[in-house]
Image (spheres, grey):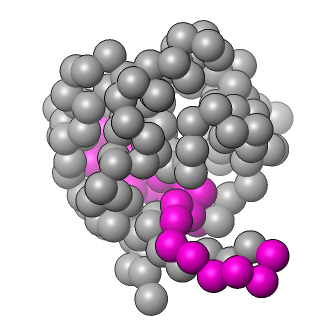
Amino acid sequence: MTLRLESGTPAPDFTLTTQSGTPITLSSLRGGPVVLYFYPAAMTPACTAQACDFRDSFAPLQAAGYTVLGVSPDDVAKLERFHERDHLPFDLLADPDHAVMDLYGTWGEKKNYGRTYEGVIRSTFIIDADGIIREALYNVRATGHVARIMRILGLAD
């Protein structure tokens, strides 16, 4: 059973590499809120739809002070292609050994068409300026999810 994080708990700190090869440490972003989302694979249909949804909603998130970060097990080179191809205005982070996914409970058993396997559990965390998880959303859908985030944050009707 994968450990699940809950609202009100400190967000586990980590350092991962962005699509441009720059390391980012979560705790260095304190002082501003973060939307941290985990997705299975860059440049797949559902993950592209989700990333583009965040891209299309980025202006109000940014205006409200949010940093958006996407995390997948892809390597930096693939993330760079994805970032450029879809003109994403936020950083994508490489977690190829899924160490951060393990910390957040977003790597675990999945079932698809009767097959059981280990993989990324599509999830999003809203982290406040003090590094506390305000919302932990597991098993989210790729489409419609960003609209839900915007409602939770009070940035949409």
Q: Quadrant of the C terminus?
A: top right
Q: Residue at x 33, y 47 (%)?
A: 95
Please give left or right for residue 50 compared with residue 82 in the image: right
In the rendered image, which quarter is residue 128 located in?
A: top left
Q: Residue at x 33, y 67 (%)?
A: 102
Q: Residue at x 69, y 39 (%)?
A: 44
| Placement of 48 over or under 138, stated as above or below | above
Q: Is residue 25 visible?
A: yes
Q: Residue at x 71, y 19 (%)?
A: 56
Residue 147 lies, in percent from the top left, at: 76, 39
Please give left or right for residue 90 compared with residue 96 in the image: right
Residue 40 lies, in percent from the top left, at: 56, 51
Q: Residue furthest bottom?
A: 1
In this view, the residue in front, 157 or 1, is: 1
Count of marks overlaid on the render = 0
In this view, the residue in front, 44 or 127, is: 44
In this view, the residue in front, 95 or 126, is: 95
- The part of the chain drawn in magenta is 113-138
Residue 46 lies, in percent from the top left, at: 74, 43
In the rendered image, which quarter is residue 48 located in?
A: top right
Q: Is residue 155 visible?
A: no
Within the magenta stretch, is there residue 136?
Answer: yes
Q: Main secondary structure of the magenta part?
A: strand
